Image: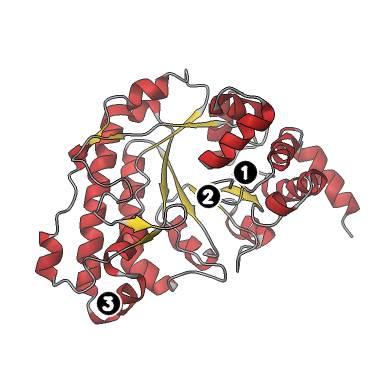
């Protein structure tokens, strides 16, 4: 199988020849990996670990704005992506929400996406579309605690803010897919609805305020015959049934150390209905473990998640962080490459009390 065929088989819940591999890594980690492995570029690293995905992006071509600001005009500062320095719609009236200077979807240049995707000769599964983090953008614009209060006191404000945000993302994604859907396989979006101990919204809040907008994006992906995968950190198990009902095809990155994210229960309850991507603990095992421990834990995760298809192996976070030892990441992906679903699962069953 090619990488593309392997990934699509997993999305259709068919066991492929090998468990597909996914690697999301920070620029800092990739730079470290290049140095330690004496590689000339990032692509050499992805080939070394057998990543079955490649990703294409639109390019911003709108008015100049500070490098540390979002498309919605929020300046951020601090470690990594930072934190918002203001919440411009925190006290806005409904009219002020409508009058806010919302971005123009035409600011995104989609002219090179199809060419860039086809450059991989359909050997890899191509991720495309805008990240579309509407939940995080609403938090930036309103403030998190303030937004929760408005869900009860002024729900029309929350609705209007989300509508404008997702109007923008819907238009951008339609432009991307009009230009290149035939060269893209997976529409990849990201919104972290979970915290360390559980969801950041109740199922009722999620279904009232967030699900309609998530479904809108899912429906756009399906209209272009794409699989749709959501990156969602944290413990969000109570929200999964609604995500499945909305038609979501895949969930990334599945953090087993968070509340409610027991892998065996997730596989049993939802494994036939949605693809899981990730689940190998990047918090404790990959950062603090030894290569031997990483190999052991990787095989344990695969024995649970791989049978029946519907699983892609990778770290339990979108970014492998710089502090992660390169040798542990290599050990994880080599263990995935050497895993045999039938043989390894049977051996595990024989040795399990």
Q: Which residue is depicted at the point 57% across and 36% down?
A: 30
Quadrant position of residue 74:
bottom left
**Label 3 or label 1, whichever comes before in sequence order:** 3
Marking on residue 314: 1
**Label 1 or label 2, whichever comes before in sequence order:** 2
Answer few, some or many: residues within 10 Å of disc 3's Cα (few below 14, many 20 plus, some between 14 and 19): some
Q: Please name which of the two marks, 3 or 2, marks the residue nearer to the observer.
A: 3
CA gap, disc 3 and disc 1 = 37 Å
Answer few, some or many: residues within 10 Å of disc 2's Cα (few below 14, many 20 plus, some between 14 and 19): many
**Label 3 or label 2, whichever comes before in sequence order:** 3
Tag 1 secondary structure: strand
Of residues 191 and 83, the one nearer the viewer is: 83
Tag 3 secondary structure: helix
CA gap, disc 1 and disc 2 = 9 Å
* Circle 3 residue: 150
Marking on residue 252: 2
Q: Are marks 1 and 2 in contact (CB under 8 Å)?
A: yes
Quadrant position of residue 75:
bottom left
Residue 9: x and y, percent? 57, 34
Q: Which residue is depicted at the point 36% across and 26% down?
A: 182
Residue 339: x and y, percent? 76, 37
Tag 2 secondary structure: strand
């Amino acid at each position: 199988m090619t990488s593309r065929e392997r990934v699509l088989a997993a999305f259709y819940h068919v066991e492929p020849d090998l468990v597909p591999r996914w690697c999301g890594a920070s620029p800092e980690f990739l730079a470290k990996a290049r140095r330690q492995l004496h590689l000339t570029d990032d692509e050499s690293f992805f080939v070394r670990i057998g990543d079955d995905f490649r990703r294409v992006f639109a390019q911003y071509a709108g008015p100049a704005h500070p490098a540390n600001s979002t498309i919605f005009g929020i300046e951020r500062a601090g470690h990594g992506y930072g934190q918002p320095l203001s919440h411009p719609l925190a006290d806005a009236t409904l009219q002020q929400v409508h009058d806010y200077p919302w971005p123009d979807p035409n600011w995104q240049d989609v002219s090179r996406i199809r060419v860039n995707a086809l450059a991989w000769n359909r050997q890899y599964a191509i991720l495309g579309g805008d990240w579309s983090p509407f939940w995080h953008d609403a938090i930036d614009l309103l403030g998190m605690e303030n937004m929760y209060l408005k869900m009860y006191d002024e729900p029309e404000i929350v609705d209007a803010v989300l509508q404008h945000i997702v109007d923008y993302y819907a238009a951008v994604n339609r432009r991307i897919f009009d230009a290149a859907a035939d060269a893209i396989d997976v529409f990849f979006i990201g919104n972290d609805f979970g915290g360390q101990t559980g969801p950041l919204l109740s199922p009722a809040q999620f279904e009232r305020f967030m699900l309609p907008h998530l479904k809108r994006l899912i429906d756009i992906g399906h209209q272009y015959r794409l699989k749709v995968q959501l990156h969602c950190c944290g413990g969000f198990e109570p929200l999964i049934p609604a995500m499945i009902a909305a038609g979501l095809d895949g969930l990334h990155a599945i953090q087993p150390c968070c509340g409610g994210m027991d892998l065996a229960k997730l596989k049993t309850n939802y494994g036939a209905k949605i693809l899981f991507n990730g689940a190998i603990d990047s918090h404790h095992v990959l950062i603090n473990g030894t290569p031997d421990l990483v190999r052991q834990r990787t095989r344990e995760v695969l024995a649970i998640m791989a049978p029946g298809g519907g699983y892609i192996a990778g770290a339990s976070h979108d970014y492998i962080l710089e502090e992660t030892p390169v040798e542990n990441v290599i050990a994880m992906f080599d263990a995935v490459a050497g895993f045999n679903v039938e043989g390894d699962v049977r051996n595990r069953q024989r040795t399990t009390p």
